[in-house]
Image (tube, helix red, strand yellow):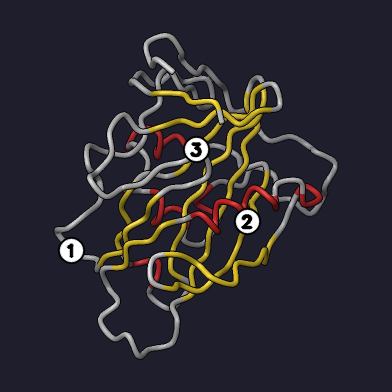
C-alpha cells in the first residue's frame, strides 16, 4: 500500500477494568522485565517515550531456544486475555529470525530467547507489538537492533506497520521480523535506516508525526 494514502491514527485508551482482575491496571513497559531495554533501539525514540506511559492491555510470552537463526521448541509460558492472542504470539516466535553476534562458543548450551507480544487497546481496535530478548543473566544489558513487529487490528484483520526501509539482511513478512543481538558496546547494528516510524500515531492523545507504511496481511 502507498504510505502517503494510508495514515494510521489511533489513541491508546487509559487502562480501565476489563473483567480480568489478575491483569495489572496501568501497567506499562516499565513494569515488564526486559521490555524497556529491548524496545529502546527497535522503535522510534518518540514512540518509545510514549510506550513508557502507555497502559498495556495484555502480555503474552513465548520461550524457545536459539538454533542457528531461529527458535526451536517455542512454547507459550505466559498468557492473558483468555489466550486469544497465544496463536499470534507463537506464529511470531516461530518466524522470528535472529542474528546472533554474541555466540562465540558453539559448544555452550542453547541460548534461551523470550518473545513478547504486547496488546494495546486503541481507538478503533487493537495494537500489537512484538520484540524478543535473551533469557539469561545479563540479557537485559545486551544491545538489540532491528525493527519491532507492529500491527493494528482493524475490521478483524491485522494491518502491519512496516519500516520505510530495511537493512540489507533484515527480513520482513506477514509474521516475520529480524532481531540482532550484540554486546552492549558494539558498534555494529541492524538498524538500517531506523526502526518502524509511525505517522500521526497518538499515545495518550499526543500525536507523533512521521512517515510509515501500512500493509494488510
Query: Label 3: few (<14), some or many (≥20) within 10 Å?
Result: many
Q: Residue at x 68, y 62 (%)?
A: 78
Q: Residue at x 40, y 23 (%)?
A: 213
Residue at which label 2 appears: 90
Q: Which residue is mark 3?
A: 150
**Position of residue 15 in the picture relative to residue 152 (left or right):** right
Which label is found at residue 101?
none
- Residue lying furthest top: 5
For the residues bearing labels 2 and 3, Cβ distance under 8 angstroms:
no
x and y, in percent, of residue 170 in the image: 31, 47
Spatial CA distance of label 1 from label 2 is 30 Å
Residue 185 falls in image quadrant: bottom left
Tell me where residue 182 sits by quadrant: bottom left
Q: Quadrant of the C terminus?
A: top right
Pick whichever of labels 1 and 2 is earlier in the sequence.
2
Nearest to N terminus: mark 2 or mark 3: 2
Residue highlighted by disc 1:
186
Residue 138 vs residue 199, the one in the foreground: 199
- The residue tagged with tag 2: helix, strand or loop? helix
Position of 152 with respect to 58 (left or right) is: left
Q: Tell me which residue sits at (61%, 31%) in the image.
A: 158
User: Quick one: label 1, few (<14), some, or many (20+) residues within 10 Å?
Assistant: few
Q: Earlier in the sequence, mark 3 or mark 1?
A: 3
Q: CA distance from mark 3 to mark 1?
A: 26 Å
Identity of the residue drawn at 22% across and 37% down: 193
- Locate residue 199, reporting x and y percent: 40, 20
Amino acid at each position: 500500500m502507498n504510505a502517503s494514502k494510508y495514515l494510521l491514527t489511533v489513541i491508546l485508551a487509559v487502562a480501565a477494568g476489563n473483567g480480568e482482575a489478575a491483569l495489572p491496571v496501568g501497567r506499562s513497559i516499565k513494569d515488564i522485565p526486559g521490555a524497556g531495554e529491548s524496545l529502546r533501539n527497535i522503535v522510534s525514540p518518540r514512540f518509545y517515550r510514549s510506550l513508557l506511559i502507555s497502559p498495556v492491555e495484555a502480555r503474552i510470552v513465548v520461550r524457545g531456544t536459539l538454533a542457528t537463526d531461529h527458535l526451536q521448541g517455542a512454547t507459550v509460558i505466559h498468557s492473558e486475555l483468555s489466550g486469544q492472542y497465544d496463536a499470534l504470539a507463537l506464529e511470531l516466535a516461530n518466524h522470528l529470525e535472529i542474528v546472533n553476534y554474541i555466540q562465540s562458543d558453539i559448544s555452550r548450551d542453547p541460548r534461551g530467547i523470550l518473545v513478547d507480544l504486547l496488546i494495546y487497546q486503541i481507538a478503533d481496535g487493537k495494537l500489537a507489538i512484538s520484540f524478543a530478548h535473551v533469557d539469561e543473566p545479563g540479557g537485559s544489558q545486551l544491545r538489540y537492533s532491528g525493527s519491532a513487529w507492529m500491527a493494528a487490528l482493524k475490521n478483524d484483520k491485522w494491518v502491519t506497520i512496516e519500516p520505510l526501509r530495511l537493512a540489507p539482511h533484515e527480513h520482513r513478512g506477514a509474521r516475520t521480523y529480524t532481531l540482532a543481538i550484540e554486546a552492549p558496546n558494539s558498534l555494529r547494528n541492524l538498524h538500517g535506516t531506523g526502526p518502524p516510524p509511525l505517522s500521526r500515531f497518538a499515545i495518550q492523545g499526543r500525536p507523533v508525526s512521521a512517515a510509515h507504511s501500512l500493509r494488510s496481511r
